[in-house]
Image (spheres, rainbow, N blue to C red):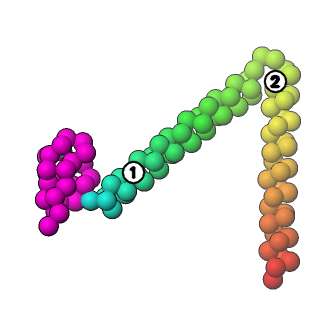
């Protein structure tokens, strides 16, 4: 039997995987899993925040009162479309060449 002290609240637990007092993970595997989940969540939140910012920026550029910004948006949009099309073409080419 292993006794583990909870890192969150200091309660001594027996073989439990989670603290019987506060529910914090105690088993190394659970601690790792919780860590991983937390990191994953943070990364997702960061990603979403970044996407939101980009979306807002694009919205702003699209409806900007300055034609230069609108033109820039159009150009960027066209370029990204071409890049996506090219990417698809090359993916197809590689798949075709590999077979
Ligand atoms: Zn605890």
Q: x, y (%) of residue 45?
A: 50, 40
Q: Residue at x 37, y 56 (%)?
A: 32
Q: Is residue 16 left or right of residue 37?
A: left
Residues shaded magenta: 1-26
Q: Is residue 39 left or right of residue 57?
A: left
Q: Is residue 33 left or right of residue 93?
A: left
**Where ligand 1 lies, by image quadrant?**
top left
Badge 1: few (under 14), some or many (20 or more) residues near its Cα, within 10 Å? few
Of the pair 51 and 74, the residue shown nearer to us: 51
Of the pair 88 and 22, the residue shown nearer to us: 22
Alpha carbons under labels 2 and 1: distance apart:
43 Å
Q: Is residue 9 magenta?
A: yes
Q: In which quarter of the image is the N terminus?
A: bottom left
Q: Residue at x 70, y 25 (%)?
A: 60
Q: x, y (%) of residue 88?
A: 80, 61
* Residue under label 1: 35
Q: Which residue is drawn at 61% across and 38% down?
A: 51
Residue at disc 2, secondary structure: helix
Q: x, y (%) of residue 85?
A: 82, 56
Going by the picture, which residue comes out furthest to the bottom? 99
Dominant secondary-structure state across the stretch colored magenta: loop
Q: Is residue 84 magenta?
A: no
Q: Is residue 21 left or right of residue 46?
A: left
| Rendered image: mark on residue 69 | 2
Mark 2 or 1: in front is 1
């Amino acid at each position: 039997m292993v006794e583990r002290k909870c890192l969150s609240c200091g309660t001594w637990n027996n073989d439990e995987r989670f603290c019987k007092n506060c529910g914090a993970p105690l088993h190394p595997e659970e601690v790792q899993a919780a860590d991983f989940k937390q990191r994953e969540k943070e990364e997702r939140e960061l990603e979403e925040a970044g996407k939101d910012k980009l979306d807002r920026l694009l919205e702003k550029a699209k409806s900007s009162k300055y034609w230069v910004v609108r033109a820039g948006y159009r150009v960027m949009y066209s370029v990204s479309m071409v890049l996506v099309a090219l990417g698809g073409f090359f993916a197809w080419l590689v798949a075709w060449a590999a077979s």
